[in-house]
């Protein structure tokens, strides 16, 4: 339950039902600086820290997130189910138009879990699937940078090989049993594709806080008596809040 602060509110889109591109707004609604956040739950998980930064900097933050739907202009994807749903494809098409012609934020932050092209098995990332995903992400981001909108990529976090709360609950005196080897934790997810796409796309900035999520080897489930993961791949809102100073530094540098 320790997730983004938007969850308890009736704000944010769903994969089912009809809903227009209506953002959730945080920070200073009258600010002349607007930061937009787009993507799936791996983008939304950063909202607690982003809200804190926005309040400190007096920025306006608008979020356009859809669970299970990465912000990417590629239709033939799959993850643990057959994705994207038609709702996701339509959402991305409309969101691209909204961001590039109406909103035009001062910075667009994006993030997403790993999605592989249909037919590329296994579902875990491979060199080929990372390359295809990176190409599609870069193409999408170029649609924004082409109209003068810089893009900040929230590099996908490493993942554990077990459910953190359950493991910690039963191993309170031996938390190392809940850790995952660093190489394995970084092998899954979109981390590699994000880094590849960001480093070769002009006006795209990699916001890499992964060393604060996994500061050593192995990657822990608990840091400083704070649970890092609320499952095996989403960060807790409490731990994300501890990273607000690092996020603030990264974003102010991009906007300078």
Image (spheres, rainbow, N blue to C red):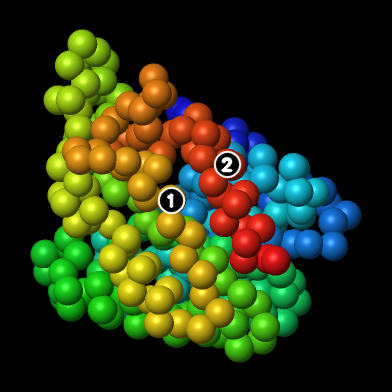
| Residue beneath disc 1 | 209
**How many badges with numbers are in the image?**
2
Q: Is residue 13 above or below residue 254?
A: above
Q: Residue furthest bottom?
A: 146
Mark 2: few/some/many CA within 10 Å (<14, 14-19, 20+): many
Give percent across and percent down for residue 32: 85, 62
* Relative to 43, 30 lies left or right: right
Q: Position of residue 244 (x, y in %)?
A: 57, 41
Q: Does residue 161 appear in this view?
A: no
In the rendered view, does 156 fall on the left or right side of 217?
A: right
At horizontal 88% and vertical 54% (from top left) the residue drawn is 30
Q: What residue is rendered at 71% in x and 48% in y?
A: 54
Q: Residues within 10 Å of mark 1 (few under 14, many from 20)?
A: some
Badge 2 element: helix
> Residue 7's quadrant in the figure?
top right
Q: Nearer the viewer, residue 173 or 128?
A: 173
| Mark nearer the N terminus (1 vs 2) | 1
Quarter occupied by residue 253 = bottom right
Q: In the rendered image, which residue does mark 2 sit on?
A: 244
Quarter of the picture holding the C terminus: bottom right
């Amino acid at each position: 339950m320790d997730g983004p602060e938007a969850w308890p509110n009736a704000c944010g889109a769903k994969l089912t039902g009809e809903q227009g591109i209506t953002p959730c707004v945080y920070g200073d609604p009258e600010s002349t600086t607007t930061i937009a956040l787009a993507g799936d739950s791996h983008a939304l998980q950063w909202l607690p820290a982003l809200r804190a930064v926005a309040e400190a900097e007096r920025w306006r933050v608008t979020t356009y997130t859809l669970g299970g739907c990465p912000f990417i202009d590629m239709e033939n994807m799959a993850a643990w189910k057959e994705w994207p749903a038609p709702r996701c494809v339509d959402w991305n098409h409309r969101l691209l138009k909204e961001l590039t012609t109406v909103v035009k934020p001062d910075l667009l932050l994006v993030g997403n879990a790993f999605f592989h092209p249909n037919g590329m098995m296994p579902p875990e990332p491979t060199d080929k699937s990372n390359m295809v995903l990176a190409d599609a992400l870069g193409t999408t981001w170029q649609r924004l940078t082409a109209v003068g909108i810089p893009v900040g990529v929230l590099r996908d976090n490493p993942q554990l090989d077990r459910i953190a709360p359950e493991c910690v609950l039963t191993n309170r005196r031996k938390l190392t049993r809940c850790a995952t080897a660093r190489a394995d934790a970084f092998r899954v997810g979109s981390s590699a594709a994000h880094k590849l796409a960001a480093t070769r796309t002009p006006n795209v900035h990699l916001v890499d806080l992964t060393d604060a999520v996994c500061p050593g080897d192995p990657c822990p489930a608990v840091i400083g008596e704070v649970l890092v993961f609320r499952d095996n791949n989403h960060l807790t809102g409490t731990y994300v809040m501890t990273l607000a100073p690092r996020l603030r530094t990264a974003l102010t540098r991009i906007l300078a």
